Image (spheres, rainbow, N blue to C red):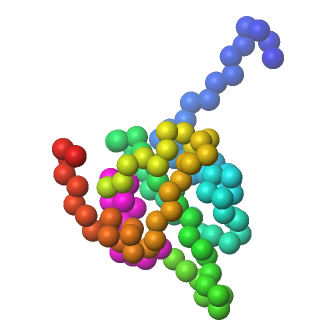
Amino acid sequence: MDKNKVKLIKISEKALKELIYETFVEKQSELLDVEPTEVSDYFEFDIENGEFIFCAIKSEDEEGNFLSLPREIDLKKVMKNIPDTTDSVFSANRYKEYTMDELIEISSQQKSDHE
C-alpha cells in the first residue's frame, strides 16, 4: 500500500449491527464452544447503552423437532438485568451458561435505572 494513502470504511449503525452479528455467527464455535450446525442463534442490541447480547440454543431435540427460544425470554430484558459476562470476548471465561428457566425468571425481573 502507498505510504501516503489511507484506506477507510465508514458505516451506518445498521451496517455496524450487521458486522457485529455476522462476526459472532462466524466465530460462535470459538466464542461459545458450540457446533454451529447444531444451534440456533438469537441476539439483541441496545445501541443507546452500547450493549449486545448473543446466545445459542440447541436447534433440534432428540426426535428432530426444531427448538426455539421460549417467547417468555426477552433478550432485551435479560441484557438489562444481567452483568456483562466478560471484559473481552477473547478471554477464556467469556460466556455464562443459563437454563431456559433462569432466563425466563431474569426476563420477568424489573430492574430500576438506579441499579
Residue drawn at the location 56% of the way across and 48% of the way down: 93
Task: Using residue 114 as the reference point, say whether residue 58 is left or right of it.
Answer: right
| Residue 73 belongs to the span the image colors magenta | yes
* Residue 64 in view here: yes
**Which residue extends farthest right?**
1
Residue drawn at the location 23% of the way across and 55% of the way down: 111
Residue drawn at the location 68% of the way across and 72% of the way down: 38
Image x and y of residue 33, in percent: 66, 59
* Residue 18 in view here: no
> Which quarter of the figure is the N terminus placed in?
top right
Q: Is residue 21 above or below residue 12?
A: below
Residue drawn at the location 61% of the way across and 85% of the way down: 61
Image x and y of residue 71, in percent: 39, 76
Task: Using residue 15 as the reference point, say whether residue 50 is left or right of it.
Answer: left
Q: Is residue 43 above or below residue 9?
A: below
| Residue 85 belongs to the span the image colors magenta | no
Image x and y of residue 78, in percent: 36, 59
Q: Is residue 16 above or below residue 104?
A: above
**Which residue extends farthest front?**
93
Task: Using residue 76 as the reference point, say whether residue 4 is left or right of it.
Answer: right
The region drawn magenta spans 69-80
Number of numbered discs overlaid on the protein picture: 0
Image x and y of residue 36, in percent: 69, 64
Task: Using residue 41 as the reference point, say whether residue 70 is left or right of it.
Answer: left
Q: Nearer the viewer, residue 7 or 60?
A: 60
**Which residue extends farthest top?**
4
